[in-house]
Structure formats: structure tokens, C-alpha cells
Image (cartoon, rainbow, N blue to C red):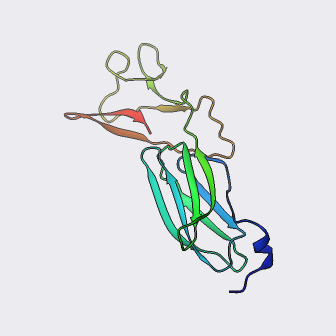
């Protein structure tokens, strides 16, 4: 094997392109100072529920480097560990990253129609609104103190409540 002497002077390093991610971000993992053109196992894990134990094979380039993009699945987990293992199963490099949830003051509001009309959180019902079947209910997402600079966030309004022929929205995901 043709080893580059500069790789032997430095320990293998593993970094992510950011320290903290939104739950749907893509994590870009970069490894440097590994043995050139060598197969390794990349492990990404989190014991926070629902647990993650992802594993894939990677091969370094002629300079002993690699780049791998890992798509987060949308579930909030505060702590992740990334490891690279050699063919004997020895961990040769490790790093961590975090996944920060939306702040607790982020909320989904809907427009109540009576008595005078205003944005509210909670349930729309016959005491505060007079929407008819098939009409559109306006929603507003209040981001509170969410810092959006550099961190794109997505959200879904899910219709997941049914009582007979009546359907409703009961949570923000």
C-alpha cells in the first residue's frame, strides 16, 4: 500500500459541517488523515428515542479523506455520535453533533370567527367559530424565538382526528 507520509503525522479526524441541526437537515460528515484508498465502517447512532443505529461502508480517496451526507429522519433526538471503525472493528475517529428542537414558545394558531375574530391556540368549536364543512380554516405558525438564520425548518399540519364523519387537526408536527 502506498502511504502518504503526511497522513501518518496526523491522527484521523472526523467533523460535521455544523455542530447543531434541525431534525430534517442533512449532516455532512468529513473524514481526513485516514489511510488512503481504505475501507472503513461509518456508524451514526443516538440512544435518544427513537434510537438510531445506522451503519455504512465508506472508502477513503487517495488522500485518505471522505465526505458522507446523512439525512436526518425528522425525529428530534438531542445527541448523536459518529464513529469510524477500521476492518478489525477498532474505533479510529469519533465526533458528535446535536439536534435542537423548536423552542417551546413555537405554536400553531387558527382563526376563530366569533365573537370578533382573532388568532387562538387550542380547539376550534361551536362556541368560538362557525366554520362549515368544506370551508378553509386559516392557520398561522408563530415561530416565537426560533432562530431561523442558517437553519431551515419544516412543519406539517396533520389531520389525524376523526369522530364519525367529523375530522380535525389536533397537533403540530
Taking 153 as reference, is 7 left or right?
Answer: right
Taking 6 as reference, is 160 above or below it?
A: above
Q: Which residue appears at 37% of the width and 23% of the height?
A: 123
Tell which of 152 and 126 is nearer to you. 152
Q: Which residue appears at 76% of the width and 73% of the height?
A: 8
Tell which of 125 and 61 is nearer to you. 61
| Residue 2 x %, y % | 72, 86
Taking 43 as reference, is 166 above or below it?
A: above
| Residue 27 x %, y % | 60, 56
Taking 166 as reference, is 102 left or right?
Answer: right
Residue 85: quadrant of the picture? bottom right
Q: Which residue appears at 58% of the width and 57% of the height?
A: 82
| Residue 49 x %, y % | 43, 44
Q: Can you name the residue that lies furthest to the top here?
A: 115
Tell which of 11 and 143 is nearer to you. 11
Residue 79: quadrant of the picture? top right
| Residue 88 x %, y % | 54, 72
Taking 116 as reference, is 8 above or below it?
A: below
> Which quadrant, please, contains the N terminus?
bottom right
Q: Which residue appears at 68% of the width and 78% of the height?
A: 36
Q: Can you name the residue that lies furthest to the left here?
A: 164
Taking 130 as reference, is 59 left or right?
Answer: right
Residue 64: quadrant of the picture? bottom right
Q: How many marks?
A: 0
> Which quadrant, please, contains the C terminus?
top left
Amino acid at each position: 500500500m502506498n502511504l502518504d507520509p503526511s497522513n501518518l503525522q496526523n491522527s484521523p479526524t472526523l467533523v460535521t459541517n455544523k455542530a447543531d441541526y434541525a431534525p430534517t437537515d442533512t449532516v455532512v460528515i468529513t473524514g481526513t488523515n485516514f489511510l488512503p484508498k481504505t475501507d472503513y465502517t461509518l456508524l451514526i447512532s443516538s440512544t435518544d428515542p427513537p434510537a438510531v443505529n445506522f451503519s455504512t461502508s465508506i472508502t477513503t480517496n487517495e488522500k485518505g479523506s471522505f465526505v458522507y451526507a446523512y439525512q436526518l429522519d425528522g425525529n428530534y433526538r438531542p445527541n448523536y455520535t459518529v464513529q469510524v471503525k477500521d476492518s478489525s472493528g477498532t474505533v479510529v475517529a469519533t465526533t458528535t453533533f446535536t439536534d435542537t428542537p423548536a423552542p417551546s414558545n413555537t405554536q400553531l394558531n387558527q382563526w376563530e370567527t366569533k365573537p370578533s375574530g382573532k388568532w387562538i391556540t387550542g380547539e376550534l368549536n361551536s362556541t368560538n367559530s362557525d366554520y362549515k364543512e368544506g370551508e378553509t380554516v386559516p392557520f398561522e405558525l408563530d415561530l416565537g424565538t426560533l432562530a431561523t438564520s442558517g437553519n431551515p425548518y419544516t412543519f406539517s399540519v396533520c389531520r389525524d382526528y376523526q369522530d364519525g364523519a367529523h375530522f380535525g387537526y389536533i397537533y403540530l408536527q
